[in-house]
Image: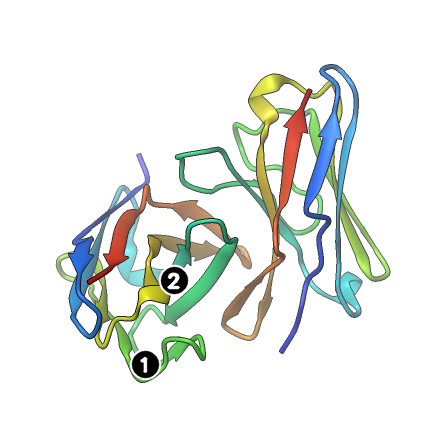
Amino acid sequence: EVRLEESGGGTVQPGGSLRLSCAASGFDFRTYWMHWVRRAPGKGLEWVAHITDDSSRRTYADSVRGRFTISRDNIKNILYLQLNSLRADDTAVYFCARTRDATLDVWGRGTLVSVSS
Amino acid sequence: SYELTQPPSVSVSPGQTATISCSGHDLDRRYTSWHQQRPGQSPLLVMYHDKRRPSGVPARFSGSNSGNTTTLTIIETQAVDEADYFCQVFENTTAVFGGGTRLTVL
């Protein structure tokens, strides 16, 4: 079964940091491009970051560039998102998703990040 | 940056047909996907390449793309279809989402 499972969310104060993980199973992780997408309370889906299969290229939304870093470990089959300098408007459920056939075809269950003092 | 526009809400009676639109400049030159998100759940791909249905998605779901508008159609709508629906395209490696449409089955 193809599966993505996020972890690492929690409550953090403004300015704090978190590292999210996304464990992949059931497919050849090292051959797929991957994304992080978030959904803030009362808002829609917002794309956050992308990484190619070999980590040669990474792209970020303007809202997170310079604060968030996407990475992956193709041996452990894990996708990461390092969140630094967190702000209240980063509060959201964060999802990892796989790219295939020019779409996001598999999504994880999400992990909640809450930024509050 | 590229933008996609959806109506905020659509209402339909059980058994009737729901139509959700998504508009963007020259949208027919891009592949559009549709993602369903029920309350408290993760998004689920229900349509890709404009009109291709992933395995497991009921045949009640169909898609089309013409000009600047992509449409997701659900015939014989059921209560289980009540959810937020997001259209999505890629702009290079960036995923662009529409604002989402809340489908209410009254």
Where residue A4 sits: x, y (%)? 29, 45
Query: Quick one: A63 or B67, which is closer to the camera?
Result: A63
Classify mark 1: residues with Cα within 10 Å, few (<14), some (14-19) or many (20+).
few
Find the residue positioned furthest to the left.
A76
Task: Identify residue for label 2.
Answer: A35
Question: Mark 2 or mark 1, which is nearer the start of the sequence?
Answer: 2
* Above or below, comparing residue A56 to residue B23 in the picture: below
Q: CA distance from mark 1 to mark 2?
A: 14 Å
In the figure, A19 relative to B20: above or below? below
How packed mark 2 is, by other alpha carbons closer than 10 Å (few <14, some 14-19, many 20 or more), is: many
Query: Where is mark 1, residue-wise?
Result: A56
Q: Is residue B28 left or right of residue A89?
A: right
Q: Residue at x 53, y 32 (%)?
A: B55
- Chain under callout 1: A
In the picture provided, is B72 more to the left or to the right than B43? right
Position of A82 with respect to B87 (left or right) is: left
Give percent across and percent down for residue A68. Answer: 28, 75
